[in-house]
Amino acid sequence: MIIHGYLHAFLDIFYSRSCLHCNNNLNSSYELYICKDCTKGISYISNSHCVRCGTALGPHTVSTAEGCMACKERNLPFSTLTSVTYYDGAMKTLIHKFKYSGQRFLCNTLNDMMLAQENLKEIVPNIDIIVPVPLHWIKKMRRGFNQAELLARGIQQYFSKPVSVNNLYRVKNTASQTQLSRKQRQINIHNAFRVHDPKSFQKKRILLVDDVLTTGVTASECSKILKQSGARSVHLLILATAKDHG
Ligand SMILES: [Zn+2]
Ligand SMILES: [Zn+2]
């Protein structure tokens, strides 16, 4: 019995896994990377958001297929914005570990979360091509992958839609934008993207995929260039959106 007890203690040391967000022990097989409590804390974005700009709608705000009052006046370059969760709590941790700590395996979990978004079943069947927001080639080489591309591949597999990865490309390697104001980001991102062959985007309904949306200037700039290339419409699909975006 004593040996058995030691064996258990020994195995616990080597096999105990902890929640990536709160560090509590994960002790059941269904808690894969984050614990039950942290999973519960992930804020999924419901249908009570404007379909065009993704802003949360209050009890007195109305939104139609054309958008809410605020976005109708903004002349947005994209037709719809679908976001899966808010960018906070455990979701922020998962995305950070995925992107910056080389934990590429987290992509499967994040892909599953994305595919669980009910609105996708209405949007994706009507699109012609999936385009991930590109990274500059230097950044992609350093990281080893483009996170938006891996998410786009998940959608491709599920819905059998083609993905275009090199036609839209990034010419400016901007430094981290997290500390910049919206205006500064807009200046930074201006003319950051180009398209090799506009013909293959002509008259296409494009699903533009990215992992995080903070101010929306990157997604808007990509959408603008896709529209300039002749795309019929651009639909944004974002894994996680900052609460105060826009
Ligand atoms: Zn946890
Ligand atoms: Zn709106």
Image: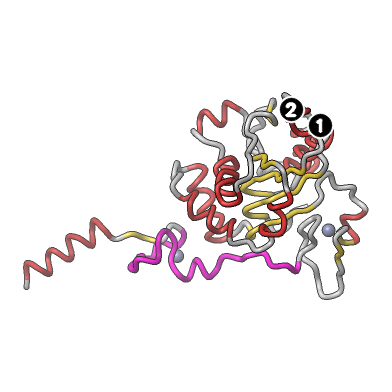
The picture places residue 78, in percent across and down from the top left corner, at: 81, 47
The picture places residue 63, in percent across and down from the top left corner, at: 86, 65
Can you see residue 119? yes
Residue lying at the far bottom of the rendered structure: 59
Residue lying at the far right of the rendered structure: 73
Above or below, 212 against 10 in this view is above
**Quarter of the figure with residue 41:** bottom right
**The residue under label 2 is which amino acid type?**
Val
Q: In the rendered structure, which segment of residues is drawn in magenta?
A: 21-48
Q: In this image, 180 relative to 11: left or right?
A: right
Q: Does 33 lie within the magenta span?
A: yes
In the picture, the disc for residue 195 is: 2
Per the model, the C-alpha gap separating discs 2 and 1 is 7 Å
| Marks 2 and 1, the one that precedes in the sequence | 2
- Read off the residue under disc 1: 229
Residue drawn 87% across the image and 55% down it: 71
The picture places residue 66, in percent across and down from the top left corner, at: 88, 58
Say what secondary structure mark 1 lies in.
loop
Residue drawn 54% across the image and 53% down it: 111
The picture places residue 122, in percent across and down from the top left corner, at: 71, 59
Q: In this image, 13 relative to 177: left or right?
A: left
Q: Are marks 2 and 1 in contact (CB under 8 Å)?
A: yes
